Every structure is written in structure tokens, then in C-alpha cells.
Image (cartoon, rainbow, N blue to C red):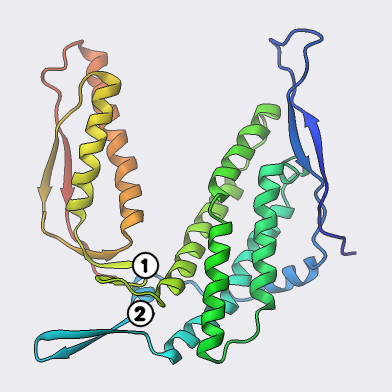
Amino acid sequence: QDRPRHTDRCCLPHSRGPGAEIGSEPRWVAMAVARLPPNFRKIREVARGTCHSISLGQLLRNTRSVETVFDGNCVVATQRADSQSLVRAGRWLQVQLPIRFARRIEDFVQLPHVIVSNSHINSVLQTYLDTFDAVSAFPEIHTAEHVEDFRTLINSHMAKHGDGTRLIAEGYRQIRGTFPGVRMDEFLHKFFTSRIATRILMENFVIMHTPQDGYVGVVRKGMRPLNIVQGLASDLTRLTHNIYGCSPEVEYRGNLDCTLDYIPRHVSYMVQEVLKNALRATVERHQSRSQSFSDLPPVVVELQKGDVH
């Protein structure tokens, strides 16, 4: 039987731990009273729908955020996508978003009670429920006015999901502090993979209405990876030097002029993590062998262009 959506909050104490003094006050953490949402049957039904995956190349080809008008070899104007392209994109997203959110909601409600009742994690669940309800209840898209209203809705809900990563991390930290044996690996993998993909779809639809020079939706055309790597290398070598008192140099090899069509923020995040680990490992490995840092080997970044999407 369907039950009313959770609204209440309670508090449960953290365990004191072996080093706590007898009689000391326990730390308290806010907990939510977790109940199934009233429309859970609908959520389960929607979750069984077909989720159409889309590659970055397909997204790029299907996005018509800018139409360039030429006069000979000169660009004379750029225009927003035509209304029919926006209507088609809106209809597709209106069908696909509820399926993606419904599946994640199902994952949430199958978590152990101690996890889903954590106030941070429960807050993320509530946001997913709100977005599912809002997108599902939106009227069928037929006109440019419908598209604009849907864009406004999507944009507002993207903002609501902004703290999702931080809230999940904080909630998991609290849970592990009280119940060290709790594991959420499979859930977290699905959650974050789906979060990235869903956010790309939502952002891409919003940006179609306000095109930027050099971009097709969220994708940067002709992005030069070397520029991103060099910018990050400057900051990370400075950080490494501040922590360890020294830092390896960064060398660049391969096809330095290569370009690709990709999402700059994602490239920046991936390169940052790999380069940060490489700098740290080089310093710590050398430090374990000798106390001299005068001949640190460089960290080599090799750029090559693979197959197109």
C-alpha cells in the first residue's frame, strides 16, 4: 500500500566510540523518518520504461543550438535553433528524464533504513522526488512557449541538484562514523554515473536556448587539451611545491596541436586528478629513496588524438 511522503525529522546519537568518557554526551545527527512516497507505484512503472542512451557524438550531432549564416566565406550571423528542433528536444527530454530519476529513486528506497533516513541523503532523495513530480506533471510540449516554460523548469531544478554531491558525501561520512561496516559502493557508482549523464542532458537543453560562440550545447568545438593541461599544471605544481617543498617539472609530448570536441569541465576534472596523483607519486617515491630533490624526474604528459566520435 502506498504511504505518505516523509516530512518528519528525528535525531539519533552517534556511538561514543572506545575512547569516549563514561557519562560524556553523545553526538547527535539529524535523521529523517523515511517513508515511501505517495506516488511510488507510478515511479516504479515509469522506471520500467526504455532509457535511451546517447553518446557524446550523438548529442553533438542532435544539438542544433546555433545556425551559422555565411556570405561567401564570411560569417554574417548566428541564429538560435529553430522552434521545431527545440520542441523535439524538449519532448525527448520530457520522456527520458522521469525514467532516469525514477530509477535512482528506486535505488534510494532500497537502501537500508539507516542510510536513507540520514538527513543529508534523504534531502537528495527529496530533490529527486520533486524533480520527478515536476517533469512528469509538465504538459506535453507542442509550441515554442511550452519549450520556454520547460527550459525554465529544467534550469530551476538543475540549481536544486547543485549540492547533491556534497550532501551524499557528508551523509556517507556520518553513516560510516556510526556504522563502519556500511557499504554503498554499488549505489554510489550508479548514482554518480547517472548524475553526470542526466546533468549533461539538462544543461545541453538549457544552453540550446542561449548559444555560446564555439559551443554546440555543452560541447566545445575544437577544444585544445594542451591549454587545459598547461593551466592545471601551473596551479598543481605550485600546490605540490607548497606541500612538499619541491615539485617535478611537467613535460609535454605528442600531438600538441590536437583538438577535439568535448566538454571542457569534464576534461579539466579528469586531467586534474591524474596530474595531481602523478606529481604526488613522483615526489613521494623519490623522497623514499633519497632526501635530495635536485634531480626529480619530470611528469610527462603525452597528447594524442584518437578516433572521432
Amino acid type indicated by mark 1: Val
Of the pair 152 and 164, the residue shown nearer to us:
152
Would residue 92 be found to the left or right of residue 178 on screen?
left
Nearest the eye: 24 or 255: 24
In the rendered view of the protein, which quadrant contains the C terminus?
bottom left
- Placement of 90 over or under 20, stated as above or below: below
297 lies left or right of 308: left
Asked whether residue 54 appears in the rendered view, the answer is no
Q: Quadrant of the N terminus?
A: bottom right
Counting residues from the start of the chain, the first of labels 1 and 2 encountered is 2
x 78%, y 16%: residue: 25
Q: Residue 65's mark?
A: 2
Image x and y of residue 121, in percent: 67, 46
Q: Is residue 149 above or below residue 277?
A: below
Number of the label disc, if any, that sits on residue 29: none
Q: Can see residue 130?
A: yes
Q: Position of residue 58 (x, y in %)?
A: 37, 76
Residue that protrudes farthest toward the right in the picture: 1
State the residue position of label 1.
Answer: 218
Corner quadrant of residue 4: bottom right
Q: Residue at the spot x=78%, y=65% of the render?
A: 40
Task: Give x and y (percent) for residue 287.
Answer: 24, 16
Element type at mark 2:
loop
